[in-house]
Image (cartoon, grey):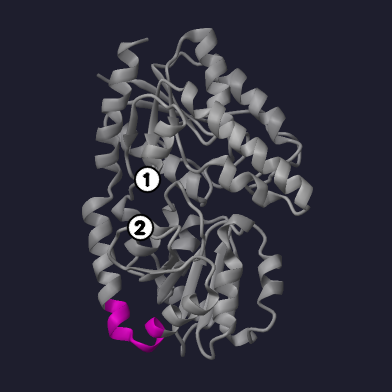
Amino acid sequence: MPLTIVQAAAFPFPSPQGSQVYVHGMSRALARRGHRVIVACYGHGLGEADPSIEVLRTPAPPGYRNLRAGPDWVKPWLDVALAARLVGVDADVIHAHNYEAPIAAYIARAVRGTPVVYNNHNTMGEELHRYFTSPLARRAAQRFGRWLDGAVPRRADAAVAISESAEPLLEELGCRDVTFIPPGVDSEELVGDGAAIVEELDLSGRTWVIYAGNPDAYQDLEVLVDAVASLDQLGLIMVSASPLEVWEGRAASIPSCRKRFVVTSSWDRVRNCLAAADMAALPRAVCSGYPIKLLNTLGFGLPTVACEGSARDIAGVVAVPNGDVEAFAEALAALEADAARRTELGEAGRRDIRERFTWDACAERLEAVYERVTKTR
């Protein structure tokens, strides 16, 4: 039976960033299966959402266009506005992501009785303190993050674990009805015009490794930058919708001919950059969720060097120890030196992604979760 499903997302939407890409892909797949899908989000984003999805926005504060994750002084007001939006929607289920959106969804449940499905993307104990620099603030943020982990997820009517490791974690946190549903891809999205980027950025003549995603501290990008700096020939491409000045400074020792920094809000341009690269990197050490960018890089046929905390059991992944710059550099150098191996790993990854990770399969499993929670409404 078709449902009205609200995807509660306390962030800008759409945007070429991990959680936003995840919600967009999930929403499109559910809409294809005949459901009415509403994404309730902040008042700004980049580009247009798929026409099959309704977008319900909070008011947009004048001049506020922040795309970065993490706390700021405006987001609490946007979260209050998000709760008000959710209270005003007559839905069958609210599927709430991250932490602020579930809190807003619980307010709507108290008013309207709408069941809430919690979707983990991370834990606050692992991430929140990474947005602060002073030791005192970091300790306080980590304690508060752990408190949020124990207080927010367990209040949902059901929970979706985005990774296999998150399933027992959510059960330990007291969540009911936990289901592991990995993210997916839409195969038609995994294409790009690499030749245009090769010409535009002058990429010919060497091998290039790409990182495409947000540049926040928890991504551990210093491991990647320092690894490339220790090599002689490998080129580095960093692509993000957010400013990259910090990482440009970190990469000062890398010759200009071996580094390219691309700030873009266009998903088409991101895809073109992925299509132009030879391999990809994912240096994040702690990730209880699922790195969506890993599915994208492998789906583009890019062998991906990943720290163990972000590596997953997918063909095409080369796992190295967390935080080990030397091991990361060795893995990159080995792939740089062996084009045949890059092709072999890349094709294996592409096949694995397209066979096992599709949004339509994920949507079918989500429907079973929705059916259980709506029966108890």
Give the position of the C terminus as an image quadrant.
top left
Residue 61 in sight: yes
Neighbourhood count class around disc 1 (C-alpha, 10 Å): few under 14, some 14–19, many 20 upward: many
Spot occupied by residue 48 in the image (x, y as percentages of width and height) = 51, 43
Q: Is 339 within the magenta? A: yes
Residue appearing at x 59%, y 79% in the figure: 259
Neighbourhood count class around disc 2 (C-alpha, 10 Å): few under 14, some 14–19, many 20 upward: some
Residue appearing at x 54%, y 73% in the figure: 237
* Circle 1 residue: 163
Spot occupied by residue 6 in the image (x, y as percentages of width and height) = 45, 25
- Which amino acid, mark 1? Ser
- Which amino acid, mark 2? Arg
When asked about the image quadrant of residue 375, the answer is top left
- Closer to the camera, 170 or 109? 170
User: Considering the numbered disc 1 on the image, is that residue within a helix, a strand or a loop?
Assistant: loop
Q: Is residue 356 left or right of residue 195?
A: left
Q: Which residues are magenta?
A: 334-343
Spot occupied by residue 323 in the image (x, y as percentages of width and height) = 54, 67
Residue appearing at x 59%, y 87% in the figure: 257
Residue appearing at x 50%, y 14% in the figure: 109
User: Considering the numbered disc 2 on the image, is that residue within a helix, a strand or a loop?
Assistant: loop
